[in-house]
């Protein structure tokens, strides 16, 4: 083994790369938010993390740039940019083996007929579908969840941007979503502290104090268990 390979092995906790996709049928439910926060939580636990940005808005790439600029001592997360319309790009990034955990972010409102979405869905260990609680959001999520169920892809839907006192709509959203896929038992609230973490390129669990950080910690635990990672 040459020194570069030795270095790679030394920086890893897992023998096999675990791949997780965050996607959704609508714009803005927190797809990028989720990968940033899970990446931060995983990196904090010493996993070697890679993040792939399929969104031409380059939300993830910019977050990684802020991380380097404002928090240069935070654990390294390696970023990759990919073309949302290029299936070869999807296959190429799926073949990357040098990280413990690879997280993939997709663009707004990716269509379920997209070959890129299909390729990514079949190449990952878990598909995450964050959604807001309202009926138009959960109905769009349902369409995507049905397709993922047909493809027999392991999927976890997650309610995000949940406002306090929204118990009735949360209940209705859960009843719709649970028909198609496993639903994460913990929903993520809407907290301004998440935006403060975002400003400096950190995930909520990497901040010294972050209201809502326990929601991310709990979702990370659920995801970790779902992909077979020990705590
Ligand atoms: N739980 C939350 N609490 C507070 N702000 C949040 C939360 N989740 C997401 N946001 C914020 O909401 C906005 C939309 O989130 P994000 O960009 O992650 O959505 P997206 O699904 O990736 O959007 P797009 O479809 O444009 O890619 C961002 O400003 C993000 O920081
Ligand atoms: Mg996004």
Image (cartoon, rainbow, N blue to C red):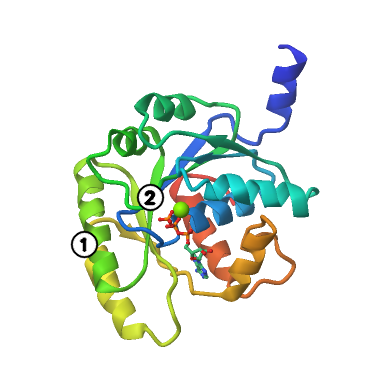
- Which corner quadrant holds the N terminus? top right
Q: Which dot marks residue 23?
A: 2
Residue at x 21% of width, y 62% of height: 179
- Work out whether mark 1 precedes mark 2 in sequence or the reverse, and give the earlier one: 2
Visible in this render: residue 74? no
Q: Is residue 87 above or below residue 101?
A: above
Q: Residues within 10 Å of mark 1 (few under 14, many from 20)?
A: few
Q: Position of residue 9 (x, y in %)?
A: 69, 26
**Dot in front, 1 or 2:** 2
Residue 63 as seen in the image, left or right of residue 58 = right
What label does residue 150 carry, if any?
Answer: none
At x 70%, y 59%, the residue is 200
What residue is at 33 percent from the left and 34 percent from the top? 116
Q: Which residue is nearer to you in this view: 20 or 24? A: 24
> What residue is shown with label 1?
179
Towards the viewer: 60 or 220: 60
Q: Which residue in the rendered view is the most extreme toward the right? A: 73
Asked if residue 49 is positioned above or below residue 171 in the image, the reply reads: above
Tell me if residue 66 can be seen.
yes
Q: Is residue 198 left or right of residue 92?
A: right
Residue 140's place in the image compared with 75, above or below, is below
- Residue 104, position in %: x, y? 47, 42
Tell me residue 164's x, y (percent). 45, 84
Q: Which residue shows up at 67% across the image and 46% down it?
A: 65
């Amino acid at each position: 083994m040459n020194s570069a390979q030795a270095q790679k092995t030394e920086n890893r906790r897992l023998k096999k790369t675990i791949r997780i996709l965050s996607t959704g049928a609508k714009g803005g439910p927190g797809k990028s938010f989720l990968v940033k926060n899970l990446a931060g939580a995983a990196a904090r636990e010493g996993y070697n993390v890679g993040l792939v940005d399929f969104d031409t808005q380059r939300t993830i790439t910019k977050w990684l740039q802020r991380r380097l600029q404002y928090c240069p001592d935070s654990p390294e997360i390696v970023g990759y940019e990919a073309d949302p319309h290029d299936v070869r790009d999807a296959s190429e990034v799926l073949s990357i083996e040098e990280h413990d955990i690879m997280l993939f972010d997709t663009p707004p409102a990716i269509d379920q007929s997209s070959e890129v979405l299909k390729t990514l869905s079949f190449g990952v260990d878990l598909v995450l579908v964050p959604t807001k609680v309202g009926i138009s959001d959960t109905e769009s999520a349902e369409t995507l969840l049905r397709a993922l169920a047909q493809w027999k892809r392991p999927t976890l839907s997650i309610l995000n941007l949940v406002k306090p006192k929204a118990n009735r709509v949360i209940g209705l959203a859960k009843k719709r979503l649970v028909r198609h896929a496993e639903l994460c038992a913990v929903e993520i609230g809407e907290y301004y502290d998440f935006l403060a973490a975002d400003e400096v390129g950190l995930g909520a669990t990497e901040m010294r104090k972050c209201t809502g950080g326990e929601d991310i910690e709990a979702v990370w635990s659920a995801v970790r268990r779902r992909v077979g990672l020990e705590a």
